[in-house]
Image (cartoon, grey):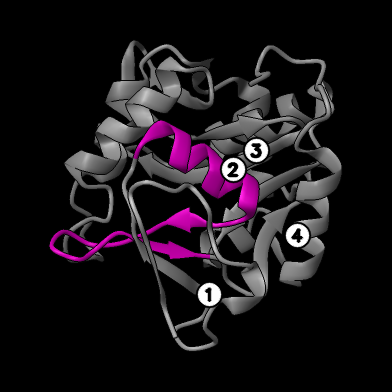
């Protein structure tokens, strides 16, 4: 039976109670307060719902992740990186990145990054949890992504691209930086061909929970410490 969250508690049900169909649906309801979102990621779940739906919380099994050392860079992407085709910055325009990620896509109807979601993650950015990666071409924002950093884990949320390989360029740059800072895992949540082409793979949810337990409270050497 699906657990409905109350606004006066931040507690989530055990991950083992997540549904098998649809895969990973753990709970519904609650709110998108910064405190609840932080608790959700620490617990191993994340919000994902469409406009008009209740807030839905997910913890799929298996979980799609990327280990920084397993980043796969194609020949074409490697060439762009060597050429320094784009400029990449961090946390320079979080609002613009999340708005671009929420924009309509030709291959999808609507967006799950609602106005309420945008406002919630802007609050997390202001509190030092959520971060953005911007990809620039001669001063124009052509790609990027955003997610959360906690301990030595990065939780990817969404990415966008307005130029060839721009999102992959930003992601590869981020992964290499995270590896240099001592991050051990990037949570990709759900499988996509795009992520698999970059080296993401599936691990059991129980293994993912182990990484949370081991690394959420470990300090990294980078500036993203929350």
Q: Distance between the residues labelled 2 and 1?
A: 17 Å
Would residue 50 appear left or right of 9 to someone viewing this image? Answer: left
Disc assigned to residue 193: none
Q: Mark 1 points at which residue?
A: 24
Q: Distance between the residues labelled 2 and 4?
A: 12 Å
Is disc 1 placed on a helix, strand or loop? loop
Is disc 3 placed on a helix, strand or loop? strand
Instruction: State whether residue 130 is above or below residue 7.
Output: above
Q: Does the magenta stretch include residue 37?
A: yes
Q: Nearer the viewer, residue 154 or 57?
A: 57
Q: Which quarter of the figure has residue 182?
A: top right
Would residue 195 appear left or right of 216 to someone viewing this image? Answer: left
Q: Mark 3 points at which residue?
A: 154
Residue at position x 42%, y 79% in the image: 2
Lower position in the chain sequence, tag 2 or tag 1 = 1
Q: Nearer the viewer, residue 102 or 49?
A: 49
Q: Name the residue under label 2.
A: 155
Q: Distance between the residues labelled 4 and 1?
A: 13 Å
């Amino acid at each position: 039976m699906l657990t409905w969250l109350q606004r006066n508690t931040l507690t989530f049900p055990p991950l083992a109670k997540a549904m098998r169909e649809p895969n990973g649906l753990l709970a519904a309801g609650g709110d998108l307060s910064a405190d609840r979102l932080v608790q959700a990621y620490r617990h191993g779940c994340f919000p994902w719902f469409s406009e008009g739906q209740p807030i839905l919380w997910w913890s799929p099994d298996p979980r799609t992740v990327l280990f920084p050392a397993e980043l796969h860079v194609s020949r074409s992407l490697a060439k762009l990186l060597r050429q320094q085709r784009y400029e990449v910055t961090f946390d320079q325009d979080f609002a613009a990145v999340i708005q671009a990620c929420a924009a309509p896509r030709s291959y999808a109807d609507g967006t799950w990054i609602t106005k309420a979601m945008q406002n919630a993650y802007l609050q997390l950015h202001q509190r030092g949890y959520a971060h953005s990666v911007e990809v620039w071409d001669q001063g124009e924002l052509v790609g990027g992504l955003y997610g959360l950093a906690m301990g030595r884990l990065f939780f990817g949320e969404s990415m966008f691209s307005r130029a060839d390989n721009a999102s992959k360029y930003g992601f590869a740059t981020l992964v290499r930086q995270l590896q240099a800072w001592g991050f051990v895992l990037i949570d990709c949540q759900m499988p996509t061909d795009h992520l698999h082409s970059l080296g993401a793979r599936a691990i059991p949810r129980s293994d993912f929970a182990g990484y949370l337990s081991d690394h959420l409270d470990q300090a990294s050497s980078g500036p993203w410490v929350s």
